[in-house]
Image: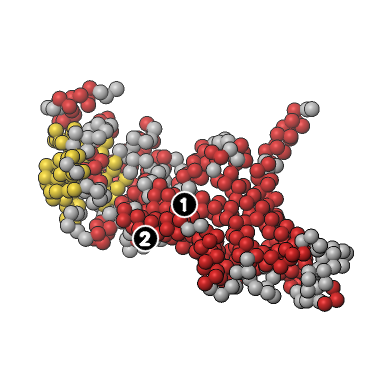
Amino acid sequence: MTAAETAAGGRLRRTLPRIPDRFAAFGAALIVIVVVASILAPWIAPYPDEPNPLELLRPPSAAHWFGTDQVGRDVLTRILYGGRTSLFIAVAVLAVSAVAGVTLGVVAGYAGGWVRDVIMRVTDVFLAFPALLLSLALAVVLQPSVNTVVLAIAATWWPWYTRLSASVAASIATRGYVDAARCLGVPAPLIILRHVLPNSLTPVLVQLSLDAGGVILTAAALSYLGLGAQEPTAEWGLMVQQGQTLFTTNWWVVTFPGLAILVTAFAFNVIGEGLRNALDPRSGGARQERAKPTSAGAAATMSTRVVK
Amino acid sequence: MIEVRDLRVRYGTRVVADVPVLDVGEGECVAIVGESGSGKSTTLLSLLGLTPDAEISGQIRVCGLDVRTAPPRRLREIRGARAALVMQSPQAALSPATRLGVLMRRALRLHGREATEQIMSEAMEAVLLDPALLRRYPHEVSGGQAQRFAIALAIALGAEVILADEPTSALDVTVQAEVVGVLRRLRAERGLALLLVSHDLALVSTIADRVLVMKDGVVVESGAAAEVLAAPSHPYTRELLEALP
């Protein structure tokens, strides 16, 4: 091998993502496919999402790639439409939980004292309940629907964000730039909004991507128990629940929606792991290898990421 | 600019700073020197009401405002806008996620000042910084540039007095000289008052008019900088001078 070839190989190795990054890119590609396919469901679904008494429980074939269910609906079509519901639930739950949890967390972390004590004790009370049990209780009290699922899961999810962001914000609150902002006469709400919040978000973003899969699984569990989405709404958990009795005779009815849940949850988790590795150089992830400081600027960038 | 009488800063029963008299007039530079833990930084922070857990007695007037009795809103108006604090670690004092220009613009608007490109550029040029640095993030500038940016911020806000807490201790020797040069020039050109906290007697001798020497929270010696540093009367001041390399 010539020197030029060795150098070219070195450049190629540096350019190609390392294994953890490749996993994250793979996960991101999967999510893009799921999201785009779900959005385009009305246009790309092979059949209308309607019962067809002439096509009951057909096995996978060229006409119906994933087969048909017990009322003759195409399973692939249902999965495409079901992605809309499941992804909506994931986004809505995480948005509500993150906004409520992070707001309370940064206020608790920055203010400290009795404000932190009150917020964190309320958080502890919510954390003391088993999450699924609390979700079930709320879902039973409220009318079963997609919105109920969002509310029930969000009610058990936000305390984790409060706890996470409170600890990060407490650390940020002691940083020099927060002192400097106080010295400049910046009022506390603005300090929280402009300095504490933006610099506390990185671990929250990682947690959000890790949690997306968990939310989809919890929503699927609630739907599976009959407390979430209701017929004729397509939702992956509901599809599994409705097909469970057919598993031994018509496996495709339950297997493909189950796989959709598995693949999406897996993809979100892989993205979360990739983000964590990329943003935390101490985790030994890909970024650590590639961002070996070659200049003061690179070193500063690394340290800033740690600070964030 | 600054008038202090019988200042006592206490944490619980422990007195961490006891300063009978401290005056800083327009265009004047007063330095507080002493070893680590002597109470000099606490004294500085207490002048802007930035020691919330401490019990403070005595009289503190900064830019005509009684700091101890002023409502928080009045105090916030003074901080930064009329009395600016320059901190020891320049880069740590800048929010890592915000560009320098955004930081300066926000500070100007917070204090009701006009935030035009021209005003910000002039402030940067006053401290010998390229206005193009306003587009950079804190980690993209050097320690000396970050420290001069902190001074530029004070200039842009029209500060009358700068309280500097070890402003050069985190910088290397050549950058220290740049920062000291900027401070000295601003004093001469704009009549800025300067209260400097430092353990660096060499720095103090080049810039300060008067000096207070603190040990264990107590002022052990004070007077004209040239006299105190040339003929110290207190053994502790002599110790500090003898420790100079």
Amino acid residing under circle 1: Leu
**Residue for point 63% across, 59% down:** A217
**Which sits in the foreground, A204 or A59?**
A59
What element does badge 1 sit on?
Answer: helix
In this view, the residue farthest toward the right is: A62
Q: Mark 2 — residue?
A: A189
**Which sits in the foreground, A74 or B173?**
A74
Q: Which image quarter holds the C terminus of chain B? A: top left
Marks 1 and 2 close (CB-CB < 8 Å): no
Dot placed on the residue nearer the N-terminal end, 1 or 2: 1
**Label 1 crowding class (10 Å Cα cut-off): few <14, some 14-19, many 20+?**
some
| Quarter residue B101 falls in | bottom left
The residues bearing labels 1 and 2 have C-alpha atoms spaced at a distance of 20 Å
Amino acid residing under circle 2: Pro
**Which sits in the foreground, A154 or B51?**
A154
Between disc 1 and disc 2, the foreground one is 1
Q: Residue A103: which numbered mark, if any?
A: none
* Placement of A38 over or under A185, stated as above or below: below
**Would residue B154 be found to the left or right of residue B195 on screen?**
right
Q: Residue A164: which numbered mark, if any?
A: 1
Q: Position of residue A162 (x, y in %)?
A: 45, 56
Q: Position of residue A304 (x, y in %)?
A: 48, 44
**Residue for point 39% across, 49% down:** A170
What element does badge 2 sit on?
Answer: helix
Q: Can the viewer see residue A55 in this picture?
A: yes
Q: Position of residue A17 (x, y in %)?
A: 68, 43
Check the residue under mark 2 and report the chain it is in: A
Q: Position of residue A7 (x, y in %)?
A: 72, 32
Q: Is there one chain holding both mark 1 and mark 2?
A: yes
| Quarter residue B72 falls in | bottom left
